[in-house]
Image: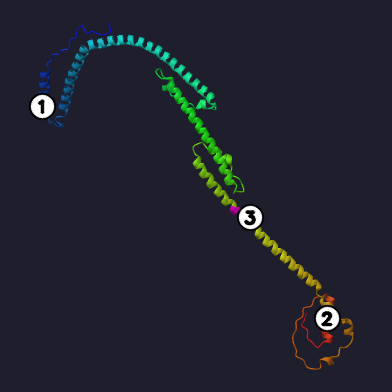
Amino acid sequence: MNELKIIEKQMPSIKTNAEELKLHVTDLLKKYEGIIATDDSYKDLKKDRAYLNKISKEIDDSRKKVKKELSKPITEFEDEMKSIVSIVKETSNDLNTQISQFEQSIKNEKLKDLKQYVLERIEEKGYPKEYADKIEINPSYYNISASFNGGKFSIDTQLHNFHEFDLEKIKGVETIKTMCETMSSNLDSPLEVERYIKCFDGTNLNALVQVITSGSQRQMKVEKETKERLQRKIEQEKLEKEKLERESIEKQKEQEQQRELPKVEEILFFEVEEEIETPFNNSFFDDEEEIRSVTWTLTGSESDLSKIRKFVITQLDVEIEEW
């Protein structure tokens, strides 16, 4: 017997004076309609409130008592049915555990076979062993009802995509190297190829090409400006050097010219000592001549200058300012 049969079932029947009680309560409450609490009615109203609360409690307690009595058979029925269900579920849970363990063992075996297939295909195709760690096997491929072919197709597709991605990455690296070499041919300092290769993830080649192009143009501009500054500096240093050389040559010429000029005392002192001892013939200056003021600058020793002064004073008709 697998189903419950109800031998006897009686619906509860309750007979009360609820209608009479309702009319009585309605009549009782009419006198409180629109009532207002005042100093005179305050105490009576409190008594009436207590009386009404008592009536309300008695009616509610009666309801609860009757409900409890009538619910007792239902409660007993529910407890009995729950006990039977519990016995059935306990055994069902034991079976469920056994089934789950068995199904999990099947799934584990399928997953193991799929992983083994990954290794075999990698070896067969000559792919890098690192591909095995990248393969993602969806749980649906090693489910109880799953087909092994579905998992194999997914694995083959992933391995192919990995290989194609690596090939594209290799091409991308070569493109970066070639581009850096080409750009570096116009630069003094070559571009850092390895730095760009490290930034390459296989999907951002176009972005890196733009970065390399802009970087080389920026470096070219910097190098050009540096060269121009250096050239200006060299030219400035050259001009300064030439200026110093010209000044040095002019200075040397002046010094040579100074050495070639005769000394003042050699021009002036033509046996001055002998002439001073012989009286000078003033008749040479008898004729009137125009009187002029002349400034001479003489260079010589103190004794030579004294001799000139003495000669001029004693032998010439000239006036000498104090010197």
Q: Which dot, 2 or 3, sits closer to the camera?
A: 3
| Residue 11 forms part of the magenta stretch | no
Tell which of 4 and 214 is nearer to you: 214
Secondary structure under tag 1 reads: helix
The quadrant in which residue 236 appears is bottom right
> Disc 2 to disc 1, how far (Cα)?
161 Å
Mark 3: which secondary structure? helix
Quarter of the image where one finds residue 264: bottom right
Q: Is residue 136 visible?
A: no
The residue that appears at 40% across and 11% down in the rendered structure is 98
Label number found at residue 308: 2
Q: Which mark is residue 30?
A: 1
Q: Earlier in the sequence, mark 2 or mark 1?
A: 1
Q: Quadrant of the C terminus?
A: bottom right
The answer, for residue 312, to whether it is visible in the render is yes
Amino acid at circle 2: Ile
**Tag 2 secondary structure:** helix
Q: Is residue 126 left or right of residue 153?
A: right
The residue segment tinted magenta is: 224-231
- N-terminal of the pair, mark 3 or mark 1, is 1
- State yes or no: discs 2 and 1 in contact (Cβ < 8 Å): no
Residue that sits furthest to the bottom in the current view:
287
How far apart in space, not on screen, are marks 3 and 1 (Cα)? Answer: 114 Å
